[in-house]
Amino acid sequence: MGSRMISALLWNIILGFVFLGVLAYAAAAWSAFLSARESGTSPVAALAGPGRETARLLIRQRSIAPGADALLARIGTWLLPLAALLAVLVIPLGQHAISDLSVGVVWFNAMEVLAWAAVWMVGWGSNSIWGLVGANRFLAQGLAYELPHMFALITAAVGAGSLRVSDIAAVQEQPGHLWFVVYMPAAFLVFLLSLLGFAFFGPFNQPVGREIAGGAAAGISGIDRLLLLAGRYLLLTAGAAMAVPLFLGGGAGPLLPAWPWVLFKTVAVLAVLVWIGRRVPAVRMERFTEISWLVLLPLTILQALAVSIFVLVGWI
Amino acid sequence: MQTVIFLICAVGAVAAGIAVFRVDSMARATLALLASFVVAAIPILLLGLSYLGVLVILMMVMEMMIMAVFMVMYMMNPAGLMPMKMVHNNRMSLVIAAVVFVLLAAGALLTPWPSGGRATSDPTLALGMDLMGPHMLVMIVIGLALFATMIAVVVLSTHRGRYDRFGDDLRRRTPDDPVRGGLGK
Amino acid sequence: MMLQLFLLLAAALFAVGLYGLLSQQSIVMILMGLELAINGIIVAAAAFWFFTTDARPDGQVLVLLAISVMAVEMAMGFAITTAIFRARDVDMADSASDLAG
C-alpha cells in the first residue's frame, strides 16, 4: 500500500466519523428539542442541551464504587461508541464505503452485537445491583430483537444477491428498480424497530430505565457516562445510516449527487426514529420477547421467503 | 506482515485462553474467553475466510454474554472477591494437556502435509453453493440438530408443564404464567 | 504464514481447553474449556481448507459444523445445569456423579 492510499484511507475514516458524530449530535439535539417542547420550556435553547451536558460530564469527576471491576467498566464504556464507529466502516456514502467488505452486512451485525458485551461490562463492572439488572435486561431484549433483525438484514442481502452493502445499494440505483422498502416493507419496519432495540432507545430504554435508577448507567459518572450516552446515539445513527443502502435506495435521487442523498435520507430516518422513540410508550422486555418470537420472527421469515420468490421470478 | 499479525494473534488467543482458568472473577473469565475467540478469529480472516471469521465473532459475542448471565446465576462466587480454587485433579490435568499438546504439535510438524491448492476467489459464495448443493445434507442435519436442541433445552430447563399453565383439565383459556408475555399466550 | 503455525495454534488452544475440561469442577467452567477446544478445531479446519484442499469448500463446511456444535453444546450444557441446579441446588460436576460406575 502506498502512503498516498493510506492517507486517503485515513481521511475517509476521519470524514466518516465526523459525519457520524455530527448526525449523532443532531439526533440528541432533536430529542432534547422534542422533550423541551413537551415540557413547555424553550425548544430552541434545548438544541444546545446535549453540548452543555457533554461539557458538564467532561469536567465531572469519575466516581467508582468500592469493589467495582473498573477494568471491565472502562472497556465497556469505550467499546460502545467504538462498536458504532466500526459498524459505519462498511456503509457507503455515495459510491464508496471506507472499507467495502464483501461480507459487509455480517460485519455490521457483528459490530452491533458488540453493544451486548459493552452494556453488560458497564452494568457488571460498576458494582451496582441496578447496573446488573439493567445489563441483564439489555441481554433479554437483545435475544428478542436479534433474530428478526438478522432476518431483516438477510432479506435485503437476498434481494441483491450479495452481502456487500454497496452491491445492495447499487441494485436499487439501477433504472427500473424500485427501492427495497417497496419489496420488503415488513423487513424495513422490523429493522427500524430493532434499531431502537440495540440503541436501547425510546420504547426499549428498559436497560437504563428510570425505575431502576438508570440501570446500566446507574453506577458511572463523568466521561464514562458521556461515552455510554453518546454511544447510544452513535449506534442509533449508524443503524439509521445502514437503513439507507439496505432499503432506501442508497444514493439514488434526482438532481443532486449520491452523497447528499445518503445524508439526507439518513437524517430523515434518524429524525423519524427519535420522534417515534419519544412517542411510543415503553415496552417491557418479557412482553416484547413474546411479540418478537410469535409475530415478528414468522413475519420476517415469510418476508424473506417472499423476496426469494421475487428474485427467482425476476421481479427484483 | 501477515506472519507478524498471525503471531501476535496466536499468542494473544492462547494467553487469553489460559487467563480463563487463572482469573478469579467469573465475569473476567467469560470475557477472557470472548477475547480468545475474537483474537483467534483474526487468523481465520487472514486466510480470506471473511464470512466465517466475522460469523465466529458475531456468534461468540452473543454466546459469551449469555454465558456471563448463567455464570452470575449459578456460580457461588461470580465476582471472585474471595478467591478460591475450584479444581480437581489439577496436576494430572496439566500433564495430560501438556502431553496432548506435544503429541498434536509433533503430528503437525512431522506429517508431510500435501501442499498447493489455491483458494477460490470468493470463498463465501463457494461455501453457499456447496451447502445448497453437494453438501446440502450437512445443512439439513445441522438444522434438524438445532431444532431438536431447542426443544430438548426448553424441556430440560423449564419446570412448568401444560398442566401447570392451563389447569388440571387443560380448560383454562389464558395460561397462568408467573411472567406474562405481550400477547397473553 | 504456513500450515504448521496454524496447527500449532490449534493444538495449543485445544490443549488449554482440554486442561479446563479435565480440571474444573463447575459445569459452566467445563463448558468454557470445551468451547476453547472446539475453537482449536475451527482454526485447524480453516487452515486445512486454505493450505491443502484444492478449491473445494469442504474445510469451510467443517468450520460451520464446528460452530453449530458449539451452539448446541452451550445450549444443552446450560439446560442441564439449570435442571440439576433446580433439582439439587448444585452446579458442580462432582455432585452429579449418579452415573459413575
Image: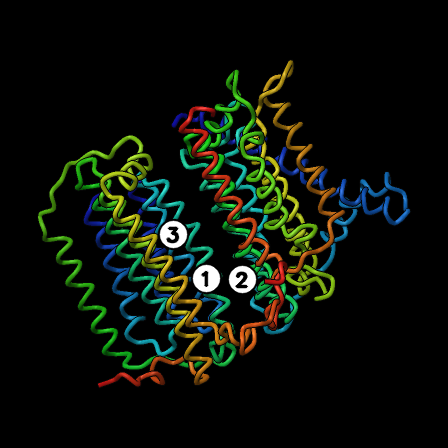
Q: Chain of mark 3?
A: B
Q: Is residue A207 above or below residue B93?
A: above
Picture residue at 31% right of the left edge, 57% below the top: C39
Q: CA distance from mark 1 to mark 3?
A: 12 Å
Q: Quadrant of residue C88?
A: bottom left
Q: Please, what secondary structure does the residue beneath circle 2 have?
A: helix
Picture residue at 45% right of the left edge, 80% below the top: C85
Picture residue at 45% right of the left edge, 36% below the top: A104
Q: Which residue was labeled with disc 1? A: B31
Q: Which mark is residue B39?
A: 3
Residue type indicated by callout 3: Val
Q: Which mark is residue A72?
A: 2
Q: Is residue A100 visible?
A: no
Expressed as whole percent of the image width and height from the top left, the position of residue A94 reads 56, 24
* Quadrant assignment for the C terminus of chain C: bottom left
Colouring rule applied to residues: rainbow
Q: Quadrant of residue B154?
A: bottom left
Q: CA distance from mark 1 to mark 2?
A: 9 Å
Expressed as whole percent of the image width and height from the top left, the position of residue A53 reads 77, 49
